[in-house]
Image: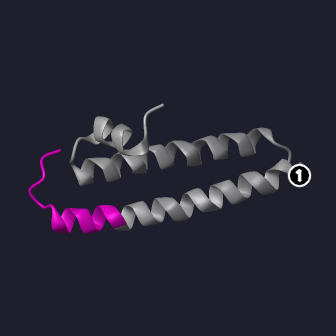
Amino acid sequence: MQDIETTATDASGDNPRRLAHDLNNAMASIIGSVDLANLKVPADDPARRYLEQIGSSAERAAGLIQRLIVILRRDYPDDPK
């Protein structure tokens, strides 16, 4: 199994902006999956509480990633995409 650093380097090279965008895409996938699961799980199902917690945490992480992207755009303005 590859470690996180190797996987991140393979996916994004040494480009921190691309890495932040890749993280953002992964988080969007998590949020979308939670949204779809919420459509299938009845409101009174105990699992709904866990889905809400996952969704809330993913939304917070997405907000942090967005802040990181803003910082990286400022600090790496000439980075090619």
Q: Is residue 33 above or below residue 76?
A: above
In magenta segment, residue 14: no
Q: Residue furthest top?
A: 1
Q: Is residue 66 left or right of residue 57?
A: left
- The residue range painted magenta reads 68-81
Which quadrant does the C terminus fall into? top left
Q: Is residue 19 left or right of residue 13?
A: right
**Residue type at mark 1?**
Pro
- Check disc 1 and report the residue beneath it: 46
Q: Nearer the viewer, residue 36 or 73?
A: 73
Residue, x 64% and y 55% (percent of image)?
55
Q: Where residue 64 sits: x, y (%)?
A: 44, 66
Residue, x 66% and y 55% (percent of image)?
54
Q: Is residue 56 left or right of residue 80?
A: right
Residue, x 33% and y 53% (percent of image)?
20
Q: Is residue 45 above or below residue 63?
A: above
Q: Where residue 2 sits: x, y (%)?
A: 43, 34
Residue, x 49% and y 47% (percent of image)?
28
Q: Where residue 22 sits: x, y (%)?
A: 36, 45
In magenta segment, residue 70: yes
